Image (cartoon, helix red, strand yellow):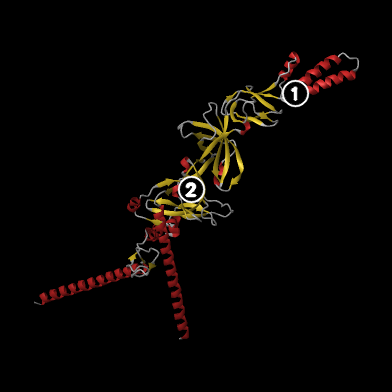
Amino acid sequence: MYLFNRKRLTLILFLSILIVGGAVLLSSCSSSDKESTSEQQEGQLWTCGMHPEVLLDEPGQCPKCGMDLVPVKQSGSEQGATANKEQKPKGERKILYWRAPMDPTEIYDHPGKSRMGMDLIPVYEDEATLGGGGAITIDPVTVQNMGVRYGTVQRMDFSRQIRTVGKIDYNEDQLYEVTTKISGWIEKLYVNYTGEMVKKGQPLLEIYSPELVTTQEEYLLALNTQRMVSESEFETIRKGGESLLESARKRLLYWDIPPEEIERLEKTGEVKKTVLLRAPASGMVVKRNVVDGAHVKAGETLFEIADLSTVWVHASIYDYEVPWVEEGQPAEMELSYLPGKIYKGKVSYIYPYLREKARDVHVRLEFENPNLELKPGMYVNIRLQTRTIPGTLVIPTEAIIRSGERNIVFVVREPGKFEPREIRIGEEGGPGNRYTRVISGLLEGEKIVTSAQFLLDSESRLQEAIQKMLEEKKQKQTSTEHQHNAGDSGEMKNM
């Protein structure tokens, strides 16, 4: 009986110990859960679905629209910051790139000196994913649903293609005017209409001039006199005859009487009633100011002839395209009614002024026209392939977020992790003018976002605002604790 009671007592004590230990364990677990929950609640922020700029540290309603606030999800960069620091000792931290202390856009893939002569500082992988500067982490499934596309920072021979329109005009260096140096009447006209093609030396018209007839007669008289006194014993008389003949000859030459016509006059002694004017060059008659029987005065323009073997094309380019254009630069031209046929030419002149109304610069191009297919007055399409800058660092233009003062691109660190990077950019160009030259801020081979980057930028700005708010809250708590500790120490001193 005594043995039975002893066993029973032992069993009761053992069960009591188990019950007490379980209660203690449950209480400790619940207290730790409460502590972690309280810590999460203390770090939790609340925002409005309609007004994301509203950030509060406790639940409630939006002060702008009255909607219930929703909790802000903690970014992956904040969740993994501590883990990254614990997992990677300082000696194993990976350096992404090196940057200048005074210019964050000046980056390198190796240590050294900046342009200002200062030592470059490293940027580590964990620093780029701690949320600093707006770096964000997004679930890969969400990234795929957003339709994010990627591009690569690359080097290429960079140039720009300028497209514009132009108008064909006559080559002013090959325009010829036919005028007369004597007055008279049109005796016979060989060119009957404007647009007629003529060849060099072809007869254009005959002019009857009484002055010309008188001058021819004077020339014949001077010729006979010179022949008569050529055998005179007096040298003065001989020279006088020669001088008179030379003077009459010069008058005929000054009136554009050809030398062969003067020789004919000397041989035959026949005075011609009219003088014949011939075409000075081959081309098209673009102006005809005379008719049969009309009276013309000396110096009056009778015809204008244009040589169309070459033509000028007048085009306009914008002022920001002027640095890309040079004299002698090759140009291509295409007619709208002859698609596929390309005409080759060159830039012959860049006018040194800006046309104020259109805010453009006038450029003149020159093209060969052997078959006379290019007719003055036609409108044409012009392409200028500009000079090449070899080995230029470029990115797709669509990857750039332009905020006015800054230009931002998102660099992909690993799947789902993106870092906003400020860059300095230059001209646009490349194939299809779809690329932009990078002056500084990126390294060759880096992967960047080319679509949906505005959504990433919105998330980055939100995370940056949250980070700043948390830092301000932490600073306030620290200052409050310092003030409280200072007050306690003061009370201890008084006691």
Disc 1 versus disc 2: distance between alpha carbons? Answer: 80 Å
Given the image, on which type of amino acid does mark 1 rest?
A: Leu
**Residue 336 position within the rendered picture, expressed as x and y whole percent measured from the top left:** 46, 35
Residue that appears at 55% across and 29% down:
369
Q: Quadrant of the N terminus?
A: bottom left
Given the image, on which type of amino acid does mark 2 rest?
A: Leu
Q: Is residue 258 above or below residue 441?
A: above
Residue under numbered circle 1:
252
Q: Contact, CB < 8 Å: mark 1 with mark 2?
A: no
Counting labels gives 2
Residue 345 appears in the rendering: yes
User: Image check: 485 left or right of 60?
Assistant: right
Residue lying furthest bottom: 495
Q: Which mark is residue 339?
A: none
- Which mark is in front, 1 or 2? 1
Residue under numbered circle 2:
443
**Residue 214 position within the rendered picture, expressed as x and y whole percent measured from the top left:** 76, 22
**Residue 401 position within the rendered picture, expressed as x and y whole percent measured from the top left:** 45, 53
Q: Nearer the viewer, residue 439 or 303?
A: 303
Image quadrant where residue 84 sits: bottom left
Secondary structure at numbered mark 2: loop
Instruction: Check disc 2: other Cα within 10 Å, few if <14, some if 14-19, many if 20+.
Output: some
**Residue 284 position within the rendered picture, expressed as x and y whole percent measured from the top left:** 58, 28
Secondary structure at numbered mark 1: helix
